[in-house]
Amino acid sequence: MAHGGIEAVLARIDADMPAATERLLDLLRIPSISTDPAYAEACTEAADRIVADLAGMGFDARRADTPGRPMVVAHAGDGAPHLLFYGHYDVQPVDPLALWDQPPFDPVVADGPNGPEIRARGASDDKGQMMTFIEAFRAWIAVHGRLPCRVTVFLEGEEESGSPSLIPFLRANAAELTADLALICDTDLFEGRVPAIVTMLRGLLGEEVTIRAASRDLHSGMYGGLAINPIRVLARILGGLHDAQGRVTVPGFYDGVREMPDAVRAQWQGLGFDHARFLGAVGLSVPAGEADRTPLEQLWSRPTGEINGIWGGYTGAGFKTVLPAEAHAKVSFRLVPGQDPQAIRAAFRAWVTAQLPADCTAEFEGHSAGPAGEMDTGHPAFEAARNALAEEWGVPAAYVGCGGSIPIAGYFKTVLGMDALLTGFASEDNRVHSPNEKYDLRSFHKGIRSWARILDRIAAART
Amino acid sequence: MAHGGIEAVLARIDADMPAATERLLDLLRIPSISTDPAYAEACTEAADRIVADLAGMGFDARRADTPGRPMVVAHAGDGAPHLLFYGHYDVQPVDPLALWDQPPFDPVVADGPNGPEIRARGASDDKGQMMTFIEAFRAWIAVHGRLPCRVTVFLEGEEESGSPSLIPFLRANAAELTADLALICDTDLFEGRVPAIVTMLRGLLGEEVTIRAASRDLHSGMYGGLAINPIRVLARILGGLHDAQGRVTVPGFYDGVREMPDAVRAQWQGLGFDHARFLGAVGLSVPAGEADRTPLEQLWSRPTGEINGIWGGYTGAGFKTVLPAEAHAKVSFRLVPGQDPQAIRAAFRAWVTAQLPADCTAEFEGHSAGPAGEMDTGHPAFEAARNALAEEWGVPAAYVGCGGSIPIAGYFKTVLGMDALLTGFASEDNRVHSPNEKYDLRSFHKGIRSWARILDRIAAART
């Protein structure tokens, strides 16, 4: 078939925006927090809702249960190329709840600095972004009766909790899920204005460490000075995670890390990244990473170590002169190509253990371990998508890095041999993972239009 | 009057033990946690209960309200000397509640390693200890009709939360509360077997610090590497609170600290302290304080710095890749004679602030600040009490130091000009401030007998 009907699809999208927005709000009302078992049923409800929606527009859609949260798998259209669209319906926890201006699962559309915005947990990450391609499918089918090529929708419900079921599921369903290209919608516009295709993604390694000392909590008046305090041990060890130049001190951490090609470095310099504006928007001013790296390198192409949570002893109102029996921290590392997550996990554990004083033990719990990803920009779909995005946004689309970890891109490559193209329409001011998350209505609207154009261009390029 | 009737008093105490134990259990059922405002009413209930008990045995007793938790003040007897007995009816919080073998405010008497023991929060610290002198008064009055000298009972309800109302109350009621000597029951037997009079008490300074960075929580994927993480700042600063020899690194911290007199050092060496047994009882083996000090010095005569609580970021189940906006710690210092709490508070704050990187601020909340205390062992009551204790326990009583802070002794001296004698019958295995606190029934029984003997000896020595 001819794919010239893009203008009609775009018009249909514009006309359907009020209904599309209501559908997103309905989905945002479901508290599908994946990291907390208390919300397991809500995750299933969200998956069921999306399965019904896709089935209603003609997809062969099903909920696929796993030992954790369910997947959604749906198929429609035929003809080359076969495109797989990925998103995730699960969301981050909402604490600290007191800092939300409204209930996180009672979404509203209200005016924001960039025009109307949708406010709720998941509005941006990733329900709002995920619905951009689903709404594009709906409009395309409404206008043309069917999609311009074969499409598989694959949605996950454990992205915010380390995706424990993902690799087994990909392996068990490899034939069904292996397409010519994966399209992933979970990333940002560059500086909130330039459409961007991510070609470099950091990986993520999560570790939880518990330091134990005495067999019970002790009174610091009775034991203080003589008994080792595990909070002190934890602070001393983790306080040494970085050297004075901001480099991670774990031995072997930088093994395999490559310098950026000059061509990439030049393109990034051309982006004119305004780090003062970027940091200023959240009350900061000074880049805090490796002192000898540019701000974009610190964000996109250099590995990091962070303490994401720490707790021990008495943390309530008032004071308690306790020497606790144990202290805890959640530590994560953002990884770049060349770093082996499992090797770094082992190195971190050895580094902590080697620093333990007498009478202390360390126990580790491994969380997510996803490698970094680099995309093959030689794939013809990349140029098609760049052109489609430029048409919609009126400025050339950029190839960028991404500081975040979207391990799915790496797994698609390593498990299924499938390349991935990542683009998305979020902004860095969307407060994802924070209170008062939002998604600009403009991102939602132009995101849907962008996917319609990308679908049109990629299908045309291949047929 | 003659004070020869001690044997009759001791017999009365022995006969009344079942009833005395029931009275203590009733008091332990009241959850008088002073540090948490949710338990303010329970504190008032505990004060009222004790006032009624004292009034019932003939004391002129009253509850004296303060801006915080109430005091109990009661008077009985006449004639020299005028003795003031101090204890506190408030208790520590109970968390972590899951580690208790029974509800902390549902006391039981059960067999323990040293015979029957009373198990509950406050069983030892300080309701059980406080009731030793109250039960001694009851027996004395039952046998003799009145006490052998003038006695004032002064009980506090804020000892576990920094005693904010204490100094104003002492000042406002100085005439009523100034006696010839204060007797304080909140300390231990030495090694659970030797009666001990504390002549050196460490002071306590509490500080809460909050490090703030970004204006909101950030996603470590989007900002990690570029944005400063306040947990990392807090860990680095507090991880440097001690040097490799275990000395506190805050500048000026050791200003004014004196070396122990040789005579005291010799007496302490003579105690034969078994630090391996002391630490081994709580699963430790190696003294963790200043490397060049003996274990007893580390516990009794050297100042310390400890992190009693730390928290920040995501601490729930699973993982959240957050860079939090703030991180917190509760830090305390045990102080020795010569150290000025307010000077050390200022030095700590300056030390933290000087280490803050760009974009970070520190906010401090001051908690308790009590100086260390040294007792005047030349007071004639000390020799009388030593002899009384030796009679009851069958071994010579020791003059010892105490690692804990009982700031009341310092305040009695500085505010009222009143000397204090501290003795008590707790054991270091009582798990005070920890889950499963207990008080040996033997401590309770012989503690009551000890006070009857001390009352007899001191009254006889002065008349």
Image (cartoon, coloured by chain):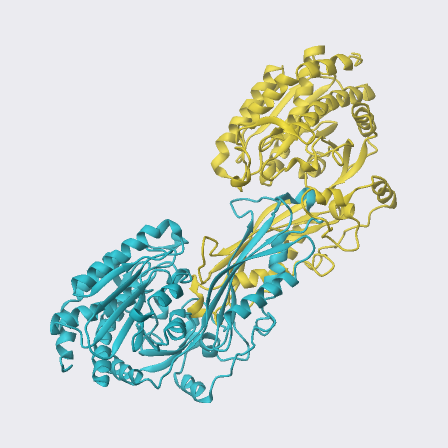
Chain colours: A yellow, B cyan
Q: Position of residue B433 (x, y in %)?
A: 39, 61
Answer yes or no: is residue A353 visible: no
Residue at x-position 60% and y-position 33%: A169
Tell me what residue is drawn at x 41 percent, y 61 percent. B164
Question: Left or right: where does residue B120 sit relative to residue A229?
Answer: left
Indicate left or right for A449 with B271 as reference: right
- Give the answer, above or below, for where A7 lies relative to B212: above
Name above or below for residue B91 compared with residue A296: below
- The location of residue A204, given as percent across then percent down, is 66, 45
Q: Quadrant of the N terminus of chain B?
A: bottom left
- Residue A319 makes an appearance in the image: yes
Left or right: residue B28 compared with residue B99: left
The foreground one among A307 and B30 is B30
Measuring from the top left, give residue A320's x and y in whole percent: 44, 60
Relative to A433, is A14 above or below? above
Quadrant in which the C terminus of chain B is drawn: bottom left
* Percent position of residue A400, x then y: 78, 38
Rendered image quadrant of residue A155 = top right
Judging depth in this view, the residue of A249 and A85 nearest the camera is: A249
Counting every numbered tag in the picture gives 0
Picture quarter containing residue A243? bottom right
Camera-nearest residue between A433 and A177? A433
Q: Is residue A25 above or below residue B62?
A: above
